Image (spheres, rainbow, N blue to C red):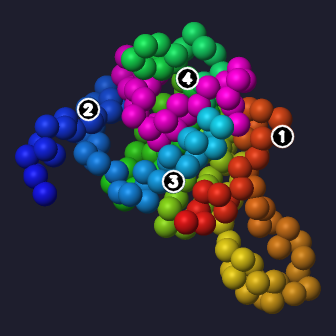
Amino acid sequence: MDHAVEKEYQTPFELIDGKVVMMSPRPRVRHAVIAGTIYRMFANHLMSKRCTALPDGVDLILDDKNHFIPDAMIVCDPDKIKDTCVEGAPDLVVEVLSPSTAKRDRGDKAKAYAQAGVRVYWIVSIETRSIEVYHNEDGRFELVQVYTYYSEADRARNAELLEGHREEEADMPYAIPVELDHGFDITLADIFEN
């Protein structure tokens, strides 16, 4: 394998509250697959609709001090989509956690997204197979729901453990509603099964 090829790629960076933060030069395969799967589901559903799904790698400029590269986003105002980037708050942003980014994704970046007016924020954890959904309440995010993927085998084991406690089983939803388009749900199995 030719390692010289790798050196040709520039390391991407983000600007968080005016500070340059270097990103991992390449995401892990699972990270890329999960982000790509979410984007693909967004894009397939939103085709020919007013909102546009955008994949990882698209620059997002919230303001002079905050330039990010989200793992996926949905933008419903076409005027925000420029030739080389998105300018202004998307309607929904997805960040897939990695050990090196988790603190920023939950901290400074979440705060910047909320203050800029992002309506919905998803934080995806590959390790726990879960998605935290936050809604913007007056410039700050409020956790609405944590969706965790359980395989059929997990559900069968849980059914035995939860026998007689049906209300707890009801708290394990199969799908996440994408609030930007009525009736648009994404199943957790489609995201985490593979």
Percent x, y for residue 190? Answer: 65, 58
Q: Residue furthest top?
A: 79
The residue wearing badge 2 is: 20
Per the image, the residue denoted by label 1 is: 183
Q: Which residues are magenta?
A: 45-73
Q: Residue furthest left?
A: 4
- The count of marks equals 4
The amino acid on which the numbered mark 4 sits, given as a three-letter code, is Ala
Few, some or many C-alpha atoms within 10 Å of disc 4 (few <14, some 14-19, many ≥20)?
many
- Sequence order check, earlier mark of 4 and 3: 3
Q: In the rendered view, tell whether residue 164 sits above or below residue 189.
A: below
Percent x, y of residue 105: 45, 45
Quarter of the image with the N terminus is bottom left
Label 4 element class: loop
What residue does disc 4 label? 89
Rendered location of residue 191, percent (x, y): 60, 57
Q: Earlier in the sequence, mark 4 or mark 2?
A: 2
Q: CA distance from mark 4 to mark 3?
A: 23 Å
- Name the residue rendered at 50%, 62% in the picture: 126
Please indicate, yes or no, whether residue 103 appears anywhere in the rendered image.
no
Are the residues at dot 2 and dot 1 in contact (C-beta closer than 8 Å)? no
- Amino acid type, mark 2: Val
Q: Earlier in the sequence, mark 3 or mark 2?
A: 2
Q: State yes or no: discs 4 and 2 in contact (Cβ < 8 Å).
A: no
From the image, tell me which residue sits under label 3. 34
